[in-house]
Image (cartoon, helix red, strand yellow):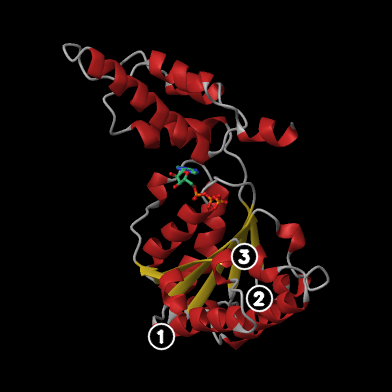
Amino acid sequence: PTVMKDVLLELPKVKWTEIGGLEDVRQLLYTVTVRPFKFPDLANKFGGTQSRKGVLLYGPPGCAKTLIAQAVATESNLNFLAVKGSELIKMYVGESERAIRDVFRKARAAKPCIIFFDEIDSIGKSRDKSQDSGLNVVTTLLNEMDGIETLKDVLIIGATNKPDILDSALIRPGRFDARQYVGLPNLEARRQIFHIHTKRMPLSTDVDLGDLAARTEGSSGAEIKDLCAIAVDASMTEFESDPTKPPEVKMSHFEYALSTHVPQTSREEA
Ligand code: ATP
């Protein structure tokens, strides 16, 4: 029963239009996840049972891996079970394994269903590198993935910032057989992300989203979202001190936000 609180059963309403960039990722996920659910007979017409059980999304933090998984669930009309790998790691012997089995049990009960394993590296660490307890955890995960009969019922989306530490057995056919890199947004994607996170704001006409995008190379989507929040805070502070002026988010507020901001990549290289 304790594991239940780690496991969230929900129907997120994230649409692809709320995600900037990542067209290639969207296409791959449509092909391997949404389409088989939408058109279950199509694979037969094309001569095979081309079914995949799992998709691994990997790449730097804050680049929409969670959003993507939620958009897939929304588009395919599946239930969605979100779990953080680190939350399944328990203190006592056998508890982590039980927690993993419980997730799969819950998914089978809620099928058709997507299991989203964030931080999958915490339960899928290479057996060479793990302690004895880690070994059992990976083995349990592999066994449970093998136990899923068809893609029609349960699909697993894993996410990690550290794909290199995953056990190689996890990325064999029948497990995470599709893999997709989710990287930092390019210029056009950053412009879209700024647009997505400012579209409900009272933006002043002097705000140039293209300029902001050009000045945030190396930033993740999560960082761009933070910048927008800082700009709004600055604008509210100004409004509070002079409520006779119109409530507006101006370029000067974004300038302030940029001055406080160090992009993800330059931190990593430092
Ligand atoms: P982590 O690896 O840290 O778990 P993640 O890759 O799963 O991160 P999300 O949690 O999906 O990233 O992203 C964090 C937030 O950043 C999102 O909820 C969203 O608001 C914003 N964001 C990130 N990327 C994008 C994007 N491409 N378009 C719109 N918003 C984005």
Q: Residue furthest front?
A: 92
The quadrant in which the C terminus is found is top right
Callout 2: SS: loop
Counting from the top left corner in percent of width and height, residue 132 is at 77, 78
Q: Nearer the viewer, residue 21 or 95?
A: 95
> Which residue does the image show at 51% across and 49% down from the upper left?
64
> Which residue does the image show at 75% across and 75% down from the upper left?
169
- 3D distance between C-alphas at marks 1 and 3: 22 Å
> Which residue does the image show at 42% across and 18% down from the upper left?
208
Which one is in front in this view, the residue at disc 1 or the one at disc 3? 3
In the drawing, does residue 155 fall left or right of residue 204?
right
Residue 237 numbered mark, or none? none
- 3D distance between C-alphas at marks 3 and 2: 13 Å
In the drawing, does residue 14 fall left or right of residue 248?
right
Callout 1: SS: helix
Q: Residue furthest right?
A: 128
Give the residue pinned by disc 3: 120
- 3D distance between C-alphas at marks 2 and 1: 20 Å
Query: Dot 1, how many residues are within 10 Å of its Cα: few (below 14), some (14-19), or many (20+)?
Result: few
Which picture quadrant has residue 231? top left
Give the residue pinned by disc 1: 109
Query: Dot 3, how many residues are within 10 Å of its Cα: few (below 14), some (14-19), or many (20+)?
Result: many
The relative height of residue 186 versus residue 66 in the rendered view (above or below) is above
